[in-house]
Image (spheres, rainbow, N blue to C red):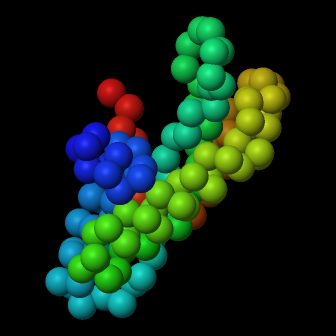
Amino acid sequence: MRRVAAALGGSVNDAYVTGIAAGLGRYHDRMESTVGELRMAMPVSTRGKGDAGANRFAPARVLVPIQPTGDLAALFAVIHDRLATTKAEPALTALESLAGFAYFLPTSLLVAFTRSQALTIDFAASNLR
C-alpha cells in the first residue's frame, strides 16, 4: 500500500480513504443511488514535527467523492487534495484550546452537541490502531 500511495504522490492514509470511497461508490451504484459525495469524519493529527509527548488529534469532516469509481488514480488524486486541504486548516489547532473550555460545560450540553455533530456526517473513518 505504501508503494502504491507513493507512486500516486500521496500517503497510505490517502490510499486508505480512497479504498473506502471506492467501496462506498460501488455500494451506492448497486443500490442505484446517484449520490456523488459523502461527508466523512476522521481524526487529523495536530502534532507538529519535533513535538514531544502524546499524539494530538482533532476531529475533521471532509466531503469525499464516491462516484464514478472507474478511475482509481483520479479518485486518489481528488481525495489526496481534499485531505491535504483539511490537514492544513488552521481551525484544527484552535480546537485544542476549546477542549479545555469544554471541561467546564455540563455533560448534557456536551452530549447534545456531540449528537448534533453526528447528524452532519455520513460515515467515520480512522486508521488509528
Task: Tell me if I can see residue 33 in this picture.
Answer: yes
Report the front residue among 124 and 66: 66
Horizontal and vertical percent position of residue 32: 24, 90
In the rendered view, does 54 fall on the left or right side of 12?
right
Left or right of 111 on screen, residue 36:
left
Residue at 43% over, 73% down: 65
Residue 91: image x %, image y %?
76, 46
Quadrant in which the N terminus is drawn? top left
Depth order, front residue of 42/15? 15
Numbered disc total: 0
In terms of depth relative to the viewer, which is nearer, 74 or 54? 74
Residue 122 horizontal/vertical position (percent): 44, 64
18 horizontally vs 36: left or right: left
Q: Residue furthest front?
A: 7
The residue located at (74%, 36%) in the rendering is: 93
Q: Is residue 114 above or below residue 82?
A: above
- Residue found at the far left of this picture: 30
- x 32%, y 51%: residue: 7
Eyeballing the image, is 104 above or below 62?
Answer: above
User: Is residue 121 something that shows in the picture?
Assistant: no
- Name the residue rendered at 33%, 27% in the picture: 129
Q: Is residue 98 left or right of residue 26?
A: right
